[in-house]
Image (cartoon, rainbow, N blue to C red):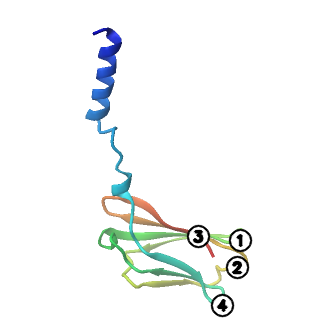
């Protein structure tokens, strides 16, 4: 065996010993049901319906980006399944962008909703 062969074997060994050969993205993806709608008076309504990761959920981070350039951020700490949150004065006639990240134990921060309403 020459030096290049030894180097190749060392690289392969290093990759497998560090755990770099596999991906844990699937194990870290979240399964939560969160919806966003706009109510009849322009309010933005967030509904949390639970999901497989409900037991590990410690909070939802809400971001609203309105079509008229305003932004709104709020942490919805430890929501209960079936919770509804209303934000009056934030909906616009245009399309508003809603993003919700969930803080889930052992999975970290995961985006669970990104939509325009």
**In-front residue for pair 13/47:** 13
* Point 36% across, 74% down: residue: 51
Q: CA distance from mark 3 to mark 1?
A: 13 Å
Q: Are marks 2 and 1 in contact (CB under 8 Å)?
A: yes
Q: Is any part of residue 99 visible from this angle?
A: no
Mark 4 lies on residue: 41
> Against 32, is 21 above or below?
above
SS assignment at label 3: strand
Q: Are marks 1 and 4 in contact (CB under 8 Å)?
A: no
Say which quarter of the image contains residue 76: bottom left
User: Where is mark 2, residue-wise?
Assistant: 92
Real-space CA distance between mark 1 and mark 4, rounded to the nearest whole angstrom: 16 Å
Residue 115 is marked as 3
Task: Identify which residue is drawn at 61% across, 85% down.
Answer: 43
Mark 4 and mark 2 in contact (Cβ < 8 Å)?
A: no
Indicate which disc, 2 or 1, sits on the residue closer to the N terminus.
1
């Amino acid at each position: 065996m020459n030096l290049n062969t030894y180097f190749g074997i060392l690289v392969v060994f290093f990759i497998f010993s560090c755990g770099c050969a596999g991906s844990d993205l699937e194990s870290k993806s979240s399964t939560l049901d969160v919806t966003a709608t706009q109510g009849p008076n322009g309010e933005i309504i967030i509904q949390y319906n639970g999901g497989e990761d409900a037991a590990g959920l410690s909070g939802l981070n809400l971001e609203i980006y309105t079509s008229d350039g305003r932004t709104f951020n709020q942490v919805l700490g430890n929501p209960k399944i079936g919770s509804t949150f209303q934000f009056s004065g934030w909906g616009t006639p245009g399309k508003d962008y809603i993003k919700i990240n969930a803080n889930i134990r052992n999975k970290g921060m995961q985006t669970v909703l990104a939509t325009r309403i």
